[in-house]
Amino acid sequence: MTYPWLRAPAARVAATAQTLLGWTVSANGVRVRLTEVEAYAGTGEDPASHAHRGPTPRNQVMFGPAGHVYVYFVFGMHWCANIVCGRDGEAAAVLLRAGAVVDGIETARERRPRASDRDLARGPARLVSALGLGRDANGTSAVDGTGPLLLTPPGTPVDPARIVAGPRVGVAAAHDLPWRFWLADEPTVSVYRRHTPRRRSPLPR
């Protein structure tokens, strides 16, 4: 089995992200086919990336090795998962944005009882919740079976004509960069929402 991102430099993370569409991610009794992903490059290359300003204790996993899982907490309530895809020391990762549950749907429904089947993994936090992942997945391998998440290629690669590109969702910088990729006509693709900066109250005079 080959993994297309293992030698992909950070500058080509967008191309790598597209190759992951149609792959499946499995964890804790649930399997999801990826229908939407989002690319993030490394230090000095991508102001929307956690690694833009260099390594920190939080983002260290983004710097390699490739094929490992980078998990982070957002908005104080949600976990999101990425697949690291750069050379060692060169940060790059692909955010798993959305997918369709193809196995273990009853377990996914138990984890997300208020969601419709279409919405079980529609969005990065929902996808992670459906898979039952958390902080313990951070830094583990997604390709060798030793971690809680396993990434598997499809039997037939996705037709490139089905891949659509557009701006990333909810980022405060580089929001018009078309590094979000999804499969056309897939109901599980998440809704696009552009980042809206919060307005600060004017200071009293």
Image (cartoon, rainbow, N blue to C red):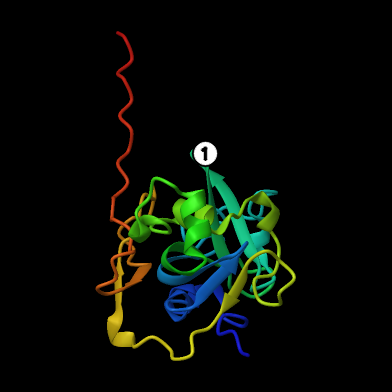
31 over 128 or under it: above or below? below
Q: Residue at x 32, y 67 (%)?
A: 178
**SS at mark 1 in the image:** loop
**Left or right: 143, with 47 as reference point:** right
**Left or right: 11, with 178 as reference point:** right
For the residue pair 129 and 78, the one nearer the viewer reads as: 129
Q: Look at label 1 and name its amino acid.
A: Met
Please say whether residue 121 is visible from this viewpoint: yes
**Left or right: 93, with 17 as reference point:** right
Quarter residue 87 falls in: bottom right
For the residue pair 163 and 6, the one nearer the viewer reads as: 163
Q: Residue at x 47, y 77 (%)?
A: 20
Quarter residue 149 falls in: bottom right
Q: Residue at x 36, y 49 (%)?
A: 170
For the residue pair 6 and 138, the one nearer the viewer reads as: 138
Q: Residue 115 at what x, y percent from top left?
A: 38, 50
68 over 74 or under it: above or below? below
Quarter residue 61 falls in: bottom right
Q: Residue 95 at what x, y percent from top left?
A: 49, 62
Residue for badge 1: 77
Q: Residue furthest right?
A: 146
Q: Residue at x 61, y 64 (%)?
A: 27
